[in-house]
Amino acid sequence: MSLAERAFRRLRDAIVQGALPAGSRISERSLAASLGISAQPVREALRRLEQDGMVVTLPRRGTVVADFGPDRQAEMGRIRAALEGAAAALAAQRADAAALDALAAQLAAMQAATAAAAPEQVSEANERFHGLIHQATGNAFLIRSLAALRAFDHFGRVRALNATPQELPRALREHAGILAALQARDPDLAEARMRAHVLRSLAVGGLLPPAPRRKRSA
Amino acid sequence: MSLAERAFRRLRDAIVQGALPAGSRISERSLAASLGISAQPVREALRRLEQDGMVVTLPRRGTVVADFGPDRQAEMGRIRAALEGAAAALAAQRADAAALDALAAQLAAMQAATAAAAPEQVSEANERFHGLIHQATGNAFLIRSLAALRAFDHFGRVRALNATPQELPRALREHAGILAALQARDPDLAEARMRAHVLRSLAVGGLLPPAPRRKRSA
DNA sequence: ATTCTGCATCTGCCATAGCAGATGGCAGCG
DNA sequence: CGCTGCCATCTGCTATGGCAGATGCAGAAT
């Protein structure tokens, strides 16, 4: 793996974990020195982070970690719901038999982990399930965008899965419904189910109002 | 503007215009020489193009222009519909009075250009209208992603606008409806209208089946 | 004729050095 | 004491050179 890729992942994890709080100034040179590499890969990593919205860099001024509080998290969640829906729709058209089999296998793994009450493995199977759908689309732009979005609220997702005891089986049922829509080759149904699944999951995590009702409190 | 940014835009335009057909091999060095700059900005431009899905680069092998025929265009269109919808929903929450005024002004400009039968200015006003909504969200990730998506089917959009005589007034009415939803601060309504608007516009351009029906003619 | 091997060459990748622009502090002037 | 202009310094940005890995071809061995 290239040094730029390594630096990118390392910085991304550091940011989402809070090790680099919002507003932190990042210098290409000093960061390169602390990583023991040249400034070029670091620069490349910063550019990618900028495209993902995690840092902002003012030309000739400096690079700082972007601020994403609860509002930004909610925004990214809503965007992710839209993109996951599109991915499900495309997967319903493009997925081949092998991809559908792999999805069924992941669903079974998630069910087994749920029955065994192993939250760690449930979360992992959950991530894999969504990742397989992304891959099944074969769309590079979609895959990349969703990977960036998932980095934002990774911890929020694992928290949401363990929020209530009934959350795990509900997520499992929704996954089964999505897979059924994919197997039925119904893009619109797959999109609707996936979108509802992500939105409801976000609501459990406390990042969105629980229902698409009228606004009552600002 | 930086050399990397210039190289990126130049390459992007060359690709969408067909000057660099799919499968064209791009070498960092030779391209840098032909542009009269160093290899570093060219490399940076290629990385951005890769993230946008326009080129694929195999490590130590080379970089080639990705193949996006009608299928890919349809995919990107569906993704754009989803993202534009999310942007409209966020804009309904975040847009301030100035942004809404600017949108109203662009709508008036589009109406005047439609009345004057000036397709060039109609298309320009159309692009500005959507761009203003993107900016109103204040979400860097969303703005960047939509900018990348719009580069794909730019020509398809201008073609769709001039496909039929009744397309211009219809797009105008839909824009007015979207703006009304934004002014009413209704995220879900704004999202639904924007999404329908983009999907219908894509159908006019021939990139999607006109209704969620089965495809009849390839 | 076919297969294997070594080398010239091309590729993306990285390190180093130096550039212009922007900032902050300090001396000098009012 | 307050303001202004200069300069050291830091920033991102670009140019140059060289690295290892991958490819294709020529020529030797079977």
Image (tube, coloured by chain):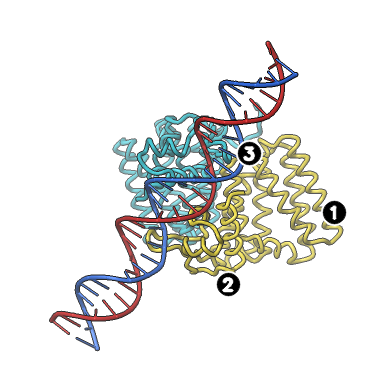
Chain colours: A cyan, B yellow, C blue, D red
Q: Does A146 sit above or below residue D4?
A: below
Q: Give the residue pinned by disc 1.
A: B112
Name the spot of residue B117 as percent of width and height, x first: 84, 61
Name the spot of residue A55 as percent of width and height, x first: 52, 38
Q: Marks 1 and 3: in contact by CB < 8 Å? A: no
How many marks do you count on the picture? 3
Q: Which numbered marker is on residue A60? A: none
Q: Is residue A159 left or right of residue A192?
A: left
The front one of B92 and A152 is A152
- Say which element carries label 1: helix
Name the spot of residue B59 as percent of width and height, x first: 38, 58
Query: As drawn, which residue projects farthest toward the right?
Result: B116
Q: Nearer the viewer, mark 1 or mark 2?
A: 1
1 or 2: tag closer to the N-terminus? 1
Q: Give the residue pinned by disc 3.
A: B138
Q: How crowded is the residue under tag 2: few (<14 C-alpha within 10 Å), some, or many (20+)?
A: few
* Chain to which the residue tagged by mark 3 belongs: B
The front one of A163 and B173 is B173
